[in-house]
């Protein structure tokens, strides 16, 4: 996939060799800093560079982080709307929603948004219809359940750690509850409204579930080490939908490459700079096939990984 993207970008750069000499303005914001969202931002910046845009030459690039604070995200959105950039890139659902509240005229490209329709960002994935399009990181929830049952066939109760204010996480919870019920698995939610509450929400699941599932929830992912430590203390396996977080405590992860998602996001921004309308650009959903395993965390959490899973794992952190 990565090789394909690099090749595609090379071709794209050649095709856009006549990038306008005049300076364009790109403004980028993300809700909080953590490895997955930082990888998206790096992908966007690389895609702009590959397309021939250079900071200080033909590009004025602005980046601001909301540092996990919705009030700050709202202030950034107002500032960006006032500056009138040519395109705004908003990473994660809260940043995209606050940007859309601030402007219905300036083109917005979102990234790392699981369900952009449910979040109110677009009318449909094929025909967004407004000033917004972007890249979805929708999790392969059915694939996650299949993987978890392969690892632990007797699983009956699955804890779900999330922030109830994140539309992504609520949407994933609804889907997970529907699919799990068909397999006789009960979902036990535990919510944390802010980072300081994550360890407490994790401990609330200990002794009540067979495993803990962490979606691509920015509040939880930002402090995942604390949640993982609390799970490991009680040998409760903790899985995440964010592959970028493998090595930070979860025993396994399955999802998209967030760098590749960032590259796709940057390419959408370039298409808009070249004159296309967001309303006509379909939302992109990259494949989410990669399975990552951390054998050190698996041992600490008392999990035996079947050889069939190890054989198809994309990356294995060994003991």
Image (cartoon, grey):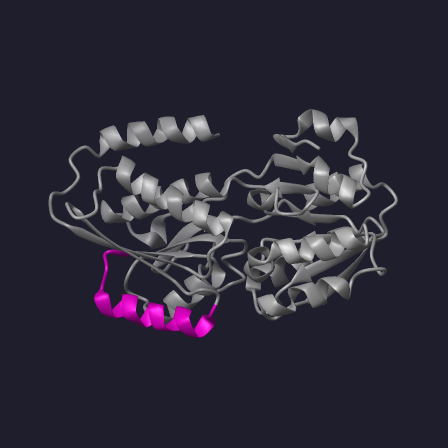
Of residues 200 and 85, the one drawn nearer to the viewer in this rendering? 200
Q: Is residue 39 left or right of residue 18?
A: right
Q: Is residue 92 magenta?
A: no
Quarter of image, res 107: bottom left
Residue 29, placed above or below residue 52: below
Residue at image position (78%, 39%) is 299
Q: Does residue 191 appear in the picture of this structure?
A: yes
Q: For this rendering, which residue is in front, 228 or 21?
A: 228
Answer yes or no: is residue 146 visible.
no
Residue at 41% from the left image edge and 65% from the top image edge: 66
**Closest to the observer: 134 or 24?**
24
Prevailing secondary structure class for the magenta stretch in the rendered image: helix
Q: Is residue 310 left or right of residue 113?
A: right
Would residue 74 be counted in the magenta stretch? yes
Q: Which corner quadrant of the image does residue 142 belong to?
A: top right
Q: Position of residue 179 (x, y in %)?
A: 74, 51
Q: Which of the image's four quarters has the C terminus?
A: top right
Q: Residue furthest left?
A: 21
* Residue 140 % position (x, y): 63, 44
Per the rendered image, the range of residues in magenta is: 69-87
The number of numbered discs placed on residues in the rendered structure image is 0
Residue 152: percent from left, percent from top? 83, 41
Vertical side of 7 occupied by 267: above or below: below
Image position of 121 (left or right of 199): left
In the displayed structure, does residue 149 sit left or right of residue 226? right
């Amino acid at each position: 996939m990565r090789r394909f993207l690099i090749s595609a970008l090379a071709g794209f750069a050649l095709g856009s060799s006549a990038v306008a000499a005049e300076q364009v303005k790109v403004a980028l914001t993300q809700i909080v800093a953590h490895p997955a969202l930082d990888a998206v931002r790096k992908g966007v910046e690389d895609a702009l560079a590959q397309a021939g845009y250079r900071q200080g030459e033909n590009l004025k690039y602005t980046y601001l982080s909301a540092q996990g604070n919705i009030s700050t995200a709202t202030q950034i959105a107002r500032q960006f709307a006032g500056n009138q950039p040519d395109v705004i890139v908003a990473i994660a659902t809260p940043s995209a929603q606050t940007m859309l509240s601030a402007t219905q005229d300036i083109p917005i490209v979102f990234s790392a948004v699981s369900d952009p329709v449910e979040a109110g960002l677009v009318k449909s994935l094929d025909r967004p219809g407004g000033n917004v399009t972007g890249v979805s990181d929708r999790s392969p929830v059915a694939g996650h359940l299949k993987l978890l049952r392969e690892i632990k066939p007797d699983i009956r109760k699955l804890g779900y750690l999330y922030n109830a204010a994140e539309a992504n996480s609520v949407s994933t919870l609804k889907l997970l509850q529907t699919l799990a019920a068909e397999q006789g698995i009960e979902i036990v939610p535990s919510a944390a409204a802010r980072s300081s509450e994550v360890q407490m929400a994790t401990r609330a699941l200990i002794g009540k579930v067979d495993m803990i599932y962490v979606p691509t929830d920015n509040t939880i992912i930002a402090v995942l080490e604390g949640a993982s430590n609390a799970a490991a203390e009680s040998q409760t396996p903790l899985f995440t939908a964010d592959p970028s977080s493998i090595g930070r405590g979860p025993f396994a992860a399955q999802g998209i490459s967030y760098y590749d998602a960032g590259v796709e996001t940057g390419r959408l921004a370039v298409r808009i700079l070249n004159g296309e309308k967001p309303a006509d650009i379909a939302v992109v959903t990259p494949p989410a096939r990669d399975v990552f395993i951390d054998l050190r965390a698996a041992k600490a959490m008392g999990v035996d990984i079947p050889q069939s899973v190890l054989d198809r794992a994309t990356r294995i952190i060994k003991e």
